[in-house]
Amino acid sequence: MAKGKSVGEFSFKFTTLINIPGPAGSVMNQFAWEGTATGFGTVFSTTTSVGGPKDGTFSECASAFLENGEGYSAIGQGTYESNGKNRWRTIDHIQLSDGRRITSEGEVDLASRSWKGTMFEDK
């Protein structure tokens, strides 16, 4: 999927990290995120990753609550790769409940417990 024009930015903090036994002796990491995203208001998201400290894949399930009382749900699939000490570059393909699809590119920083990035419309 080619990415289109930028539709905004997101800035999340993780509030919880849960480690879960995964397939074939792996450990899955489940992060609970909260923050804001341009056009989506307040966002609560859970990501579940499998892989290791260098790279892997993740799924995302999110709910967004706009100031006007409307809301969205979203499901995403993505990848991450090491981008420095305890930092990961992410790419996430997201299906929104209104039918739109977006791609996000971001960076997770464990020291600040943050995930920040840019969202693009999918073409």
Image (cartoon, rainbow, N blue to C red):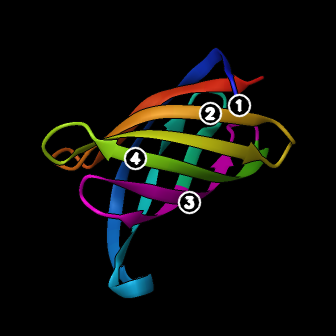
Identify the residue position indicated by label 4 in the image: 80
Q: Mark 1 or 2 closer to N-term?
A: 1
Kindly report the distance in space between the C-alpha atoms of the residues bearing marks 4 and 3.
Answer: 11 Å
Q: In this rendering, which labeled residue sits more in front, label 3 or label 1?
A: 1
Q: Mark 1 or 4 closer to N-term?
A: 1
Residue 25 position in % (x across, y down): 34, 86
Q: What is the secondary structure assignment of the residue under circle 3?
A: strand
Identify the residue position indicated by label 3 in the image: 59
Q: What is the secondary structure assignment of the residue under circle 1?
A: loop
Check if residue 59 falls in the magenta segment: yes
Q: Mark 2 or 4 closer to N-term?
A: 4
Q: Amino acid at mark 3?
A: Ser
Q: Amino acid at mark 2?
A: Thr
Tell me, yes or no, whether the two marked residues, 1 and 2, touch with CB atoms within 8 Å.
yes
Kindly report the distance in space between the C-alpha atoms of the residues bearing marks 3 and 1.
Answer: 17 Å
Seen at 68% across and 37% down, the residue is 67
Number of the label disc, if any, that sits on residue 103 = 2
Quadrant of the image occupied by residue 119: top right
Q: Is residue 66 above or below residue 113?
A: above
Residue 108 position in % (x across, y down): 32, 43
Q: Amino acid at mark 1?
A: Met
Q: Is residue 18 left or right of residue 79?
A: left
